Image: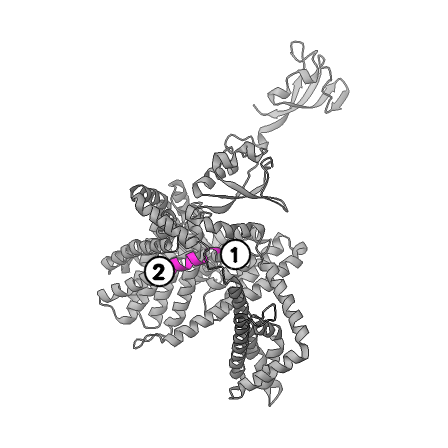
Amino acid sequence: MSSVAPIKDLAVILSAAALVTLLFRKLRQPVVLGYILAGILISPKTSSLHLISDLSNTRVWADLGVIFLMYSVGLEFTFQKLVRVGLVSLITALIEILSMGALGFLCGRWLGWPLSECIVLAGMLSISSTTVIVKALDELGLKTKRFAEVVYGVLVVEDLVAILFIVSLSMLTLRSIPLSSDMLFASLKLFFVIVSWFLAGYFLVPSFLRYTNRLLDSETLVVFSTGFCLCLAVMAASSGYSLVLGAFIMGSILAASPLSERIGELIRPLRDLFVAIFFVTVGMMVDMKALGQHPEKIVFLAVITVACKGSAAAIGALTSGESIHNALRTGLSLAQIGEFSFIIAGLGYSLGLASESLFTMAVAISAITSFTAPYSIRFSEKVAQWADKVLPDSLKNRLAAYAAWVRRPGDRFDRRQFYRRLLRFVLNGVLVTLVFQLVKQYGLPFLEGWMTKGASLSAVVLSFLLASPFIWGMFFAFRPKVQLIQDTPLLEFYVCEFLTVIWLGLLTDVFLQTAASFLITLTFLVILFLSSRAGLEKSYRWFEGQLLSNLTPSASEQTKSLANLLAPWDLHLVRVKVHPNSQLAGLALVDAGIRVRYGVNVVIIHRGVKAIVNPEADERLYPGDELLVLGTDEQIDSLRDAAEGVMLREQAMRRLSDYSLKRLFVGDSNLYAGQRLRDSGLREIGALVVGLERGSYREINPAADTLLKQGDVLWIVSDKD
């Protein structure tokens, strides 16, 4: 019977979620709120019916919900898109996190809490709920908006900061604050882990899917993609990080594959199912009795969260160069806290850094702000329109000029070649470090069991051999193309070589722990380059070519990166699909008035495997075409209505079951007698003649010039009316 308990709990959760969300659908309210309410109703802390046997059983289902949600976000949020909104999201997130962290710490001190609880509260109020916001944006149909892209980027930065905070929280004791050196080490470790996963994933996974594409039917593809997701999620958890981080990174890696859209469609049912379970679980964590003990503190912190967090995010978006409209919508979308907040509070409680009441308040504030979040996102458009009316024109013009100045390319591309070489040096350094770490973790124990002496030196030799192509990439990352006496390129080249030796010396010292580590490193480098320099260069060029082929953005992504420069005017690129019943289907671009009527530009038309870049005005739109269009949110919405649903009237459409085969007798008084079939008018009234009986003679699909005679029997297909 023990194996039945988890299934029983799952049945109760899904049944409660279904019943409550039906009501919310009827009331046109966000489904997320229905899930949370369902959790409150069936929680053992609220209900006396004991519907849930063990809350720990539901934790696994809830974790799967977060994993699949972040996985699907990663599938839509490609590496190129991360780069495209990276600076905007980074500035916005840092301003918001620092502001809310400082405010949370001050609120804790004002309430008279201990120093450790103040730090925990600062972390709680700094992180928004990725799950709630992504689900709300999806339900409200806003995930393709420009501000939504910024919000997604901010959430990614916040999740990384939350992971770093959780790592550093374990270093915190009641008597001390984490040392800056510990924080720096944790940050560097997180950076190396993420970059190495991205590099390894971009090199291996898209290539694997490309070579096995013919063997991947829907069943195999969903098994493979789900397996990849869970493997990296587990790897992240075993490395001391969050399952969410691994799921998101794997989604971003698979987004580089041409199968990303197909994978997204296949896992959507899994995502929706487990996300519903997650939100119900959140509702079950709310202790209604404990809430009555600190109502004033909960309300105070909830108000602070909604008001100040939204304001800080809006100010951050303005600082990064977003328009007033997008900045306000970004701020209102981020005005809440979620799962990471009560994870931080729960960890603080387990470490003895915070009281149980703080954890209860974290869950309560998260639940309250989860209720308000969908409404703040929904009404953000009206707030932005109101602000646009009441703000003076002089202020709006200054902010627009500032946004244009921030987005102006200026001199930041003058040293593009230097930054590209620096990136190559750092990425190769990460790969070299990864190889040394893997050899230390897996190769060294094997060598120590196989040989009594020299295991460490053998591990160093093995590391150098395996990492040799990437060592070559580090060593010659700044090699000038023309070997002339030019101070700057040669100086950069020599500094790069020196830093490579230092980097490798430190890695070698991890194995040997001797003063001669750097001398041994130089010896290995000389032997390596003298023996097989040409082979190393060839191997590295092959690896770099494979990686770049997977990372190279498509024509649409290249256009998106250029479109980012138009952000001060709220222009961005969105995909719009032409529905078979659309009023645009069959029309040429000029006849449809895409540019004149809707104000958008069609950049690319995707038709099957064909991509029509910069289509001509006489290019026709066909059902199923996917358009990459450039315009404002309002312009794209009007085009989307025309392309995807304006002609669609499901209630008025004839269903197949409305048509049937009928028998029509041509009698004496029948008007059809003596007329040819084409002149009978049957086709005009929606009747298709498929057969003719004349005595013992039968004919299928009679010709249009057939003369109808008295006594003929016609077989026709028409609607039942």
Report the predominant secondary structure element of the magenta stretch. Answer: helix
- In the image, residue 571 sits, relative to residue 412, either above or below, namely above
- In the image, residue 280 sits, relative to residue 546, either above or below, namely above
Regarding residue 564, the answer to whether it shows in the image is yes
Q: Residue furthest bottom?
A: 453
**Along the horizontal axis of the image, is 114 left or right of 403?**
left
Question: Residue 14 versus residue 283: which sits nearer the camera?
Answer: 283
Q: Pointer 1: what residue?
A: 80
For the point 28% across and 57% down, the residue is: 304
Q: Is residue 450 highlighted in magenta?
A: no
Distance between the Cα atoms at labels 1 and 2?
23 Å
**Along the horizontal axis of the image, is 635 left or right of 590?**
left
Please identify the quadrant where the C terminus is shown. Answer: top right
Residue segment shown in magenta: 84-96
Numbered disc 1: secondary structure: helix
Label 2 packing within 10 angstroms: few (<14), some (14-19), many (20+): many
Q: Amino acid at mark 1?
A: Gln
Residue 177 in percent (x, y) is at 32, 74
**Along the horizontal axis of the image, is 408 left or right of 472?**
left
Quarter of the image holding residue 618? top right
Q: Pointer 2: what residue?
A: 95
Residue 454 in percent (x, y) is at 60, 88
Residue 583 in percent (x, y) is at 53, 32
Question: Residue 181 versus residue 498: which sits nearer the camera?
Answer: 498
Q: Is residue 87 highlighted in magenta?
A: yes
**What colour scheme was applied to this rendering of the protein?**
one colour
Label 1 packing within 10 angstroms: few (<14), some (14-19), many (20+): many
Regarding residue 328, the answer to whether it shows in the image is no
Quarter of the image holding residue 162? bottom left
